[in-house]
């Protein structure tokens, strides 16, 4: 990544405005003009464009900065890792002030609201100030049609259902317009992906002191919306990842749910091998376990431990395969004991051994196979 300071910003700014951009050349001049008019005066500030564009947006930002004399910088990312959310996190890493406002580059978020967010944050002592469309005084007029309004409202309801406690003070959890105290963030805890970075900040940093400021969501000034069905599906995956990744307890519950689903291929394979093919139950149990291992790995890797892929796919699968087959060294003797000594049925005995080994498998998978991601600070050249 390359950080270019086009015009001089204050040595110690009191506010950084982060603007993530992707092909927003037509909006830069108007956005800059209105930001300077709204925030300027007695407040030393800087505007940081974090740019993933494939068009002339970076060049336009430089031209506008020189023409307007605005304190603009560009952090251009050659590899847009994490999408818009990743851009915001990279901006937070290089921001020089404690208070940071995040605003879209399409002018659907009115720059005139920026000072109100910071003033309310300082007055209330909040960690996060959310610009909301749904409080008294807010409006959603910029949502282009009924379809977008339905998607937005449905996503809001779903988010509040998934995180009822954390979202209690937030009427607009889908907002991308907010002010946050940078000193209260643990940036290395974040795993940004997609559009909804504020949700990521609240959940992974456990921000509690949250207040809101209403605003009117406007129509785009120029260009086309980036919203799509693909982004909607990505948001659903992000929501699942945040929910099951917030604590070891939720990961364990999800791990258990996947393990329960794995009983089906395991027991079905065991029944086919023993009842239909006449194989000895001990050997059949080993083979049936392999089917369950593949089933469980596919689900766990995709949903439960998504974002904790510290190793490559082959190493993760190999470790998981080794873990579960080592597990057989404990389970098969126990199964033999249950069947031979206590006259328990093969299917029932297998079920008992699977449940008995569950806790050990989870701890090994969570602590060794899927290490928590260690994020290094972003280097800016």
Image: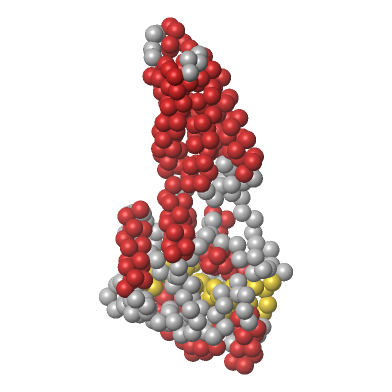
Compared to residue 179, the image places residue 219 above or below, namely below
Of the pair 317 and 65, the residue shown nearer to us: 317
Picture quarter with the C terminus:
bottom right
- List x then y, in percent, for residue 369: 59, 38
Of the pair 216 and 112, the residue shown nearer to us: 216
In this rendering, does residue 38 appear at all?
A: yes
Q: Residue at x 60, y 89 (%)?
A: 64
Residue reaching furthest top?
Answer: 341
Q: Residue at x 27, y 75 (%)?
A: 136
- State the image quarter where residue 322 is shown: top right
Q: Is residue 361 left or right of residue 120?
A: right
Compared to residue 11, the image places residue 368 above or below, namely above
- List x then y, in percent, for residue 127: 44, 64
Q: How many marks?
A: 0
Q: Residue at x 55, y 33 (%)?
A: 364
Picture quarter with the N terminus:
bottom right
Of the pair 290 and 364, the residue shown nearer to us: 290
In this rendering, does residue 196 appear at all?
A: no
- State the image quarter where residue 349 is shown: top left
- List x then y, in percent, for residue 19: 53, 75
- State the image quarter where residue 74 is shown: bottom right
């Amino acid at each position: 990544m390359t950080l270019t300071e086009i015009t001089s910003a204050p040595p110690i700014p009191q506010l950084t405005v982060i603007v993530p951009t992707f092909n927003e050349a037509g909006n830069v001049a108007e956005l800059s003009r209105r930001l300077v008019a709204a925030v300027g005066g007695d407040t030393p500030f800087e505007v940081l464009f974090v740019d993933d564009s494939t068009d002339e947006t970076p060049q336009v930002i430089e031209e506008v900065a020189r023409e307007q004399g605005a304190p603009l910088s560009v952090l251009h990312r050659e590899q847009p890792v994490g999408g818009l959310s990743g851009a915001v996190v990279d901006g937070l890493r290089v921001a020089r002030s404690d208070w940071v406002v995040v605003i879209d580059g399409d002018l659907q978020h009115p720059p005139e609201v920026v000072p109100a967010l910071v003033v309310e944050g300082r007055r209330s002592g909040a960690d996060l100030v959310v610009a909301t469309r749904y409080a008294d005084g807010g409006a959603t007029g910029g949502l282009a049609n009924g379809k977008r309004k339905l998607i937005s409202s449905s996503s809001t309801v779903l988010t509040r259902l998934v995180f009822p406690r954390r979202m209690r003070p937030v009427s607009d959890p889908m907002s991308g317009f907010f002010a946050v105290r940078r000193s209260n963030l643990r940036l290395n805890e974040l795993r940004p992906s997609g559009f909804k970075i504020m949700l990521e900040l609240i959940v992974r940093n456990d921000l509690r002191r949250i207040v809101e400021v209403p605003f009117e969501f406007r129509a785009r000034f120029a260009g086309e919306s980036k919203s799509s069905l693909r982004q909607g599906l990505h948001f659903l995956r992000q929501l699942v990842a945040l929910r099951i990744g917030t604590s070891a307890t939720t990961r364990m519950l999800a791990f258990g749910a996947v393990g329960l689903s794995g009983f089906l291929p395991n027991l079905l394979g065991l029944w086919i091998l023993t009842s239909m093919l006449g194989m000895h139950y001990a050997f059949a149990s080993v083979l049936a376990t392999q089917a369950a291992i593949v089933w469980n790995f596919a689900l766990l890797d995709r949903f439960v431990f998504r974002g904790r892929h510290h190793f490559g796919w082959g190493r993760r699968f190999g470790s998981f395969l080794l873990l579960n087959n080592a597990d057989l060294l404990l389970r098969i003797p126990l199964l033999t004991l249950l069947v031979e000594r206590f006259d328990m049925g093969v299917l029932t005995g297998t079920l008992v051994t699977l449940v008995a080994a569950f806790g050990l498998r989870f701890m090994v998978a969570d602590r060794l196979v899927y290490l928590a991601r260690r994020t290094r600070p972003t280097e800016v050249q």
